[in-house]
Image (spheres, rainbow, N blue to C red):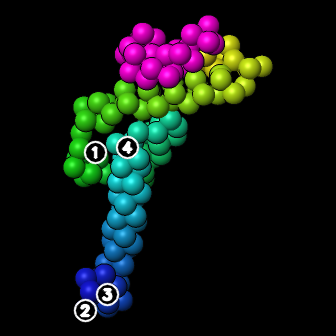
Amino acid sequence: MPVIDIVAVMCLYVGRIISNCKERQGMSEHKEIAAELLKELRRGTPRYKPYLGSLVRELHGGGLSLRDLGTDYAAVKSLLPQNHKKSALMWLRAAHEDTERRPAHLQRMRLELRKGGFTLESFGKEHWSIGAMLGALA
């Protein structure tokens, strides 16, 4: 019998344990969602802010810590530069495509670069086509 079925049967027979089982099941759901959010942050996403906010909510809602996901604050913080870079790329593309709102998009791009510890020069050198685009957008 699978472990989850054994837990369900135990909950049916022991009335006092029912609430604890529900809490554990909820914690498990929070942990799964938090693990998926962390996986996305590790991959890097331009929309990292909602992922971070959701990660915090899931951890809090499940009574979990980053340690329960096999990580810690320093490791999550170390993921931010790559996410800032992806966000900067997104804003650069938006500036390239939306000439009417270009100044605002470029301002957001520069902010993301600064938050990630990048300079326009290092960003442009790493992505030569983006460096050319930066020159064209200046």
The label shown at residue 43 is: 4
Spatial separation of the CA atoms under disc 1 and disc 3: 28 Å
The label shown at residue 5 is: 3
Q: Percent from the top left, x then y, of residue 111?
A: 51, 16
The answer to whether 68 is drawn above or below residue 93 in the figure is below
Q: Residue at x 74, y 20 (%)?
A: 99
Say which quarter of the image contains residue 82: top left
75, 95: nearer the viewer = 95
Q: Amino acid at mark 4?
A: Arg
Report helix, strand or loop for mark 3. helix
Label 4 with label 2: CB-CB less than 8 Å: no
Label 3 with label 2: CB-CB less than 8 Å: yes
Q: Nearer the viewer, mark 4 or mark 1?
A: 4
The label shown at residue 66 is: 1
Q: Percent from the top left, x then y, of residue 102?
A: 69, 18
Q: Nearer the viewer, mark 3 or mark 4?
A: 4
Does residue 34 appear in this view? no
Spatial separation of the CA atoms under disc 3 and disc 2: 6 Å
The answer to whether 3 is drawn above or below residue 98 in the figure is below
Does residue 120 appear in this view? yes
Dot 3 or dot 4, earlier in sequence: 3
Q: Amino acid at mark 2?
A: Met
Spatial separation of the CA atoms under disc 1 and disc 2: 31 Å
Task: Give neighbour class at mark 4: few <14, some 14-19, many 20+ (Cα, 10 Å).
Answer: few
Q: Amino acid at mark 3?
A: Asp
Which residue was labeled with disc 2?
1
Dot 4 or dot 2, earlier in sequence: 2
The answer to whether 77 is drawn above or below residue 61 in the figure is above
Task: Give neighbour class at mark 1: few <14, some 14-19, many 20+ (Cα, 10 Å).
Answer: some
Give the residue furthest to the right: 100
